Structure formats: structure tokens, C-alpha cells
Amino acid sequence: MPYRDDQTRTRKYSLAVIADNVRAKFAALLPLMQDLQESRQAEIVQFETAIRNILDDFGTVGVNRVPYLNYGRALYGHMGHQSGIALRKAATAEKAKWVSLGLDATVLDQITTAVIGAAVY
């Protein structure tokens, strides 16, 4: 037997999604959400600029840059969930995936150092 019956669940759901409550919460959080988004976008621009500089050093041009940028973005995504050794292990797995897709391991190592500040295992 479930903890709550279907009628209780339906009533609680209908109370949770009162439009005025949702609007008020969103309006109250909007300035904070915008500030956080601006700071995240600034971080993304910073590490993508570092990646582009690395690619310039290696002479990677045109559409060949996209996979390397995607690798850096994947590492940045892992930074939101892991840190320390777990992050380095996730970076190692990411690097293995992208090397199997044909990317240069040396370039990926430099991108990893630029994005997470440490080398892969």
C-alpha cells in the first residue's frame, strides 16, 4: 500500500503549482539567477579563450577546433559535480573517449590542465 493515495498526491500537486506562488518565487529568485548565470558565462568565456589559445599554438583551425572545445566544455561540466581525484579520473575517462574519436592526446592534456588546473592520471 502506498504511503499516500492518489487523491492526496493530486491535492498536494495542485497546491504546489499555484500559479501565483510560482510567479512570486520566480520573481524573487530572478536577480540571483541572472547574477549566477553572468558569472558562469564569464568562466566559460575564460576557459574557452584559454582553449583557443592552445589550439592556436598547435595550429588547429576551422571546424577542427569544435571537438576540442566540446572536450573542454565536458570537463567544465564535470567540475560542477566532482573535484580532486574524482575530477581527475573523470577527466581521464573523457580524454580516453576523445582520443578514441581521433583527437590529439597532447592537445587534450594541455586543455585539461588549462580547464581543471591538473593533469589527468
Image (cartoon, rainbow, N blue to C red):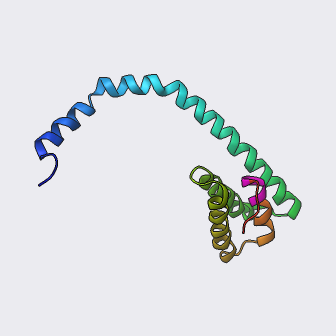
Q: Is residue 94 above or below residue 84?
A: below
Q: Is residue 35 magenta?
A: no
Q: How many labels does the image show?
A: 0
Point out residue 57 in the picture as x, y percentages from the top left corner.
Answer: 88, 60
State the residue at coordinates (18%, 42%).
9
Point out residue 64 in the picture as x, y percentages from the top left corner.
Answer: 74, 65
**Residue placed most toward the observer, 117 or 99:** 117
**Residue placed most toward the observer, 36 or 83:** 83
Q: In this view, does 11 lie above or below 29?
A: below
Question: In the image, 40: left or right of 114?
Answer: left
Point out residue 25 in the picture as x, y percentages from the top left corner.
Answer: 39, 26
Question: In the image, 89: left or right of 2?
Answer: right
State the residue at coordinates (75%, 44%).
46
Q: In this view, does 117 lie above or below 23?
A: below
Determine the image quadrant of residue 111.
bottom right
State the residue at coordinates (64%, 67%).
94
**Residue placed most toward the observer, 109 or 38:** 109
**Residue placed most toward the observer, 92 or 20:** 92
Q: In which quarter of the image is the C terminus?
A: bottom right
Determine the image quadrant of residue 108.
bottom right
Q: Quadrant of the N terminus?
A: bottom left
Give, as a single range, the part of the protein colored magenta: 112-116
Determine the image quadrant of residue 52.
bottom right
Question: In the image, 59: left or right of 20?
Answer: right
Q: Main secondary structure of the magenta part?
A: helix
